[in-house]
Amino acid sequence: MQEIKPEEIVKKRILIGIAGGSGSGKTLIAKNLFRDLGTDRVIIIQQDAYYKDLSHLSFEERVKQNFDHPDAIDSELLLQQLNGLLAGETIQQPIYDFTIHSRKKTTETIGGHDIIILEGILILDNPELRNLMDIKVYVDTDADIRLIRRLIRDTKERNRSMESVIKQYKESVRPMHLQFVEPSKRYADVIIPEGGMNYVAVDLLRTKIEVLLKELDED
């Protein structure tokens, strides 16, 4: 796919950015919007899918990587593919396997949606990503709740031990949150406390997106 520069895009689609700490409830908000706005019009893009390919490293070396630092993200590919989606193109999105800390060989074909919801812990830290967004959201959830959710998710869904999850939280998740994620909420248009369970905030967000959709349909 030919690279498209942001200034060359004639936007006919809406990009919503949903940021917040790991376990804050970003994914639940994205899924609620996906359900309410219509699955034929909305696609969710997770920044986690764009972790750099580490297949050249041994598993032991992959485990040692800091996955909560901006350098862990293949931002160049993410920006390229978002620009493509906003321009109406179809992309081949990478698929990341968290159990082995590497990309799968297969990709997912995505395209043809009016609303793109980008969710990830570091998306508001990146000025190039922010410049593409129509609405910037930060989900603000207490640290203890986020840690509990992360423990449940990583042990059940990613086959991790509780000890490894806690070790990673202490060594990289928490310090990177304080250095990069928490400060990025100053760029948000909307800050949602209590995560995806804040139904009033989610309803207001959905209403705003519906207004933007109507404006697109009238153009």
Image: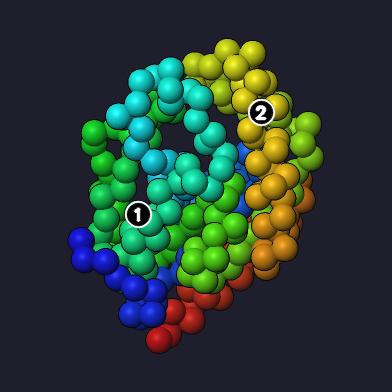
Is residue 157 placed above or below 15 in the rendered structure?
Answer: above
Quick one: label 1 or label 2, which is nearer the N terminus?
A: 1
Q: Residues within 10 Å of mark 1 (few under 14, many from 20)?
A: some
* Gap between marks 1 and 2 measured at Cα: 27 Å
Of 52 and 194, which appears nearest the observer?
52
Asked whether residue 39 appears in the rendered view, the answer is: no
Which three-letter amino acid code belongs to the residue tagged 1?
Leu
Q: Of discs 1 and 2, which sits in the foreground?
A: 2
Residue at which label 1 appears: 77
Of 133 and 208, which appears nearest the observer?
133
Left or right for 42, reference 208: left
Asked whether residue 73 appears in the rendered view, the answer is: yes
Which three-letter amino acid code belongs to the residue tagged 2?
Glu
The percent coordinates of residue 59 (x first, y second) are: 39, 19
Give me the residue at 52% from left, 75% from top. Answer: 212
Q: Tag 1, which secondary structure?
A: helix
| Quadrant housing the N terminus | bottom left
Residue at which label 2 appears: 171
Give me the residue at 32% from left, 43% from top. Answer: 94
